[in-house]
Image (spheres, rainbow, N blue to C red):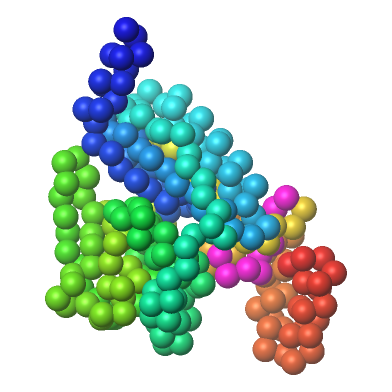
């Protein structure tokens, strides 16, 4: 009887599906949604990145923070994991992504993420307002968005009639949650604080090639963190690597040095 009552209570709640990496933006969205009587279904796609276990550890720790917070009203469903290697190929989507990539240098993850949404439409993908955000800038330049209010949540979708057809093909099934699409990372920090999750910020993960269980300081996400005024999130060693990278990055010898370093050390 208790199980039936719990199931009936669960079925009355609006379901939100969100791509969660344990990162800064998607964690803020999880916290934002946690204040509402919703069912949240997080998804994590397992790629070959060296940061996978760090991201899963972050997700586990942050779920603990959310569940013990007195203002939490949501129910977080068990994390669904899916191997990128198991996503079915789609030549049409991949060719379209390749055309976009040539113009914008968008990350390769958007190819398989788009293919994933063929069977998981309406998945929220979190991007913030940023001049460093390639996807944000790409959408701003080549698409129009429509705000949708659905029950307790508000999100954006691409406007089919006013957006580049290639972008519609690749990103048309995604939901872009608000207010993330309209605020910067520094503004999100203030939102973390207002929501009572300031300590959770340091539990989020962003680095793709961790060194000694810390951020590397030289991968693209690490560089973005510094560029957006959040260098405090890097360790002193990571900051030192970042400064070295910025100082010598255009030197020919440094290019070869990085290749050797990656083969020997992995970053």
Q: Does residue 12 appear to the left or right of 252 in the view shown?
A: left
Q: Quadrant of residue 61?
A: top right
Q: Quadrant of the C terminus?
A: bottom right
- The answer to whether residue 248 is magenta is no
> Quadrant of residue 146 in the image?
bottom left
Q: Quadrant of the N terminus?
A: top left
| 123 horizontally vs 43: left or right | left
Instruction: Report the magenta residues as a range.
Output: 213-221
Mark count: 0
Q: Is residue 219 magenta?
A: yes
- Which residue lies at the image location 45% right of the left edge and 47% below the top edge? 43
Q: Residue furthest bottom?
A: 252
Residue 137 in view = no
Pick the residue in front: 170 or 64: 170
Q: Position of residue 265 (x, y in %)?
A: 82, 66
Image location of residue 69, percent across then percent down: 42, 26
Q: Position of residue 55 (x, y in %)?
A: 58, 48
Q: Residue at x 24, y 36 (%)?
A: 14
Left or right of 169 on screen, residue 46: right
Most frequent secondary structure within the magenta stretch: loop
* Residue at image coords 37%, 59%: 117
Q: Does any portion of residue 253 appear in the rendered image?
A: yes
Query: Going by the image, does 232 lie left or right of 14?
Result: right
Q: Which of 79/193 is in front?
A: 79
66 lies above or below 234? above
Does residue 87 sit above or below 40 in this rendering? below
Where is residue 219? Give x, y as percent. Answer: 63, 68
């Amino acid at each position: 009887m208790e199980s039936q009552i719990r199931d009936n209570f669960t079925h009355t709640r609006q379901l939100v599906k969100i791509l969660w990496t344990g990162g800064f933006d998607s964690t803020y969205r999880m916290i934002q949604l946690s204040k509402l009587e919703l069912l949240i279904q997080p998804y994590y796609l397992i790629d070959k990145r060296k940061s996978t276990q760090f991201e899963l550890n972050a997700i586990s720790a942050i779920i603990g923070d959310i569940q013990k917070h007195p203002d939490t009203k949501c129910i977080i469903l068990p994390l669904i994991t899916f191997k990128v290697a198991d996503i079915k190929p789609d030549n049409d989507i991949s060719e379209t992504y390749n055309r976009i990539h040539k113009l914008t240098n968008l990350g390769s993850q958007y190819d398989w993420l788009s293919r994933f949404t063929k069977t998981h439409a309406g998945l929220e993908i979190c991007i913030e307002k940023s001049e460093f955000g390639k996807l944000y800038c790409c959408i701003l330049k080549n698409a129009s968005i429509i705000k949708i209010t659905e029950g307790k949540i508000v999100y954006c979708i691409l406007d089919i009639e006013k957006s580049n057809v290639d972008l519609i093909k690749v990103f048309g099934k995604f939901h872009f949650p608000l207010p993330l699409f309209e605020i910067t990372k520094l503004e999100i920090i203030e939102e973390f604080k207002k929501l009572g999750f300031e300590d959770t910020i340091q539990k989020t993960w962003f680095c793709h090639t961790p060194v000694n269980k810390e951020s590397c300081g030289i991968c693209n996400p690490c560089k973005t963190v510094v560029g957006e005024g959040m260098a405090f999130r890097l360790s002193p060693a990571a900051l030192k690597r970042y400064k070295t990278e910025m100082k010598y990055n255009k030197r020919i010898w440094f290019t070869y040095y990085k290749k050797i370093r990656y083969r020997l050390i992995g970053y």
